[in-house]
Image: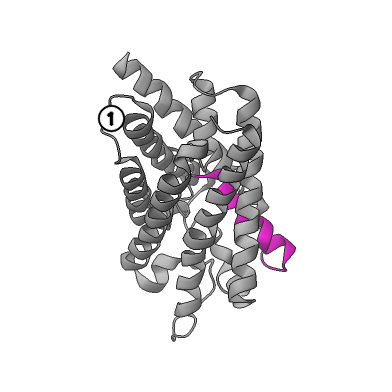
Amino acid sequence: MSSLARRCCAEMLGTGLLVYFGAGAAAMTLMIAAGTDTASSFNIGIGALGGLADWLAIGMAFAIVIAAAIYALGSVSGAHLNPAVSIALWATKRFPAGDTGAYIISQLVGAAIGSLLFAASAGMDAITIGGLGATVPFPGISYGQAILAEFIGTFLLMLVIMGVAVNSKAPAGFAGLVIGLTVGGVITTTGNIAGASLNTARTFGPYLGDWLLGGNNLWVYFPIYIIGPILGAVAAAFLYDYLTG
């Protein structure tokens, strides 16, 4: 097994790529829409600008980068790329507590770096128009509804991770593809509820980038993306153990 330092570097790199290309795709969608006659404030929502096809495109960007990161880095760190996944594996006694904390810090740092690099690449429009792809509840969605959507989406994601990556009986070689496509599908269906983060780090990076670079201060929504994903992942891991025990 690689040293903890190397595994943390892999988690930082993988999560940074996830945010750069995944959240970056959400920001880019809004930036492209700003060139049309449609209002471009990211608070209006991607679905209001381009419909479900926008969410499919964003979902596929996430699916591809997640699959790529898993295949590239999974042999180093396991490619958790998500604090909720690390916590769920710790809660079911599959991952040590000390490593869990180190992984989470690495994922948050990687997400922040990925978001800042996207801002550096794409310019101020990525912040003022694209919001760096930050996730927020959409108009008419309550705090509780947003948490529920994040819970359900991450529940499915973690259930799939347990089945295709954690279970030693799973067919080899398919984990990255199936996990990536699962994320893409969840984003397509639930993106217009609360942004379909499914990942505390994925939301943290754009929030920090927006806050540091003069964009919107969105921290009031951050608990949604802590509570929903973590509870959803832990619930799925325990249910999977019950069903397969």
Q: Relative to 98, is 150 above or below?
A: below
Quadrant of res 58: bottom left
Query: Relative to 84, does residue 96 appear above or below in the rendering?
Result: above
Foreground pick, 226 / 81 = 81
- In this image, 11 relative to 64: left or right? right
Compared across the picture, whether 8 is left or right of 89 comes to: right
Image location of residue 11, percent across then percent down: 56, 43
Q: What span is in magenta?
A: 199-215
Say which residue appears at 55% left-offset and 30% top-offset: 87
Residue 51 occupies quadrant: bottom left
Residue at point 61%, 60% (across, down)? 115
Residue 124 relative to residue 143: left or right: right
Residue 204 counted in the magenta span: yes
Which image quarter: residue 235? top left
Q: Which amino acid does label 1 sit on?
A: Ala
Residue 48: % across, % down? 41, 69
At x 37%, y 54%, the residue is 63
**Residue 166 versus residue 221: which sits nearer the camera?**
166
Furthest toward the top, the residue is 245
Q: Is residue 141 visible?
A: yes
Which quarter of the rendering shows the C terminus? top left
Q: Where is residue 77 in the image (x, y as percent from the top left)?
A: 52, 37
Describe residue 120's horizontal placement relative to residue 63 as left or right.
right
- Name the residue that disc number 1 marks: 170
**Is 194 located above or below residue 128 in the figure?**
above
- Give the main secondary structure, helix, strand or loop, of the magenta stretch: helix
Evaluate whether residue 224 shows in this view.
Answer: no
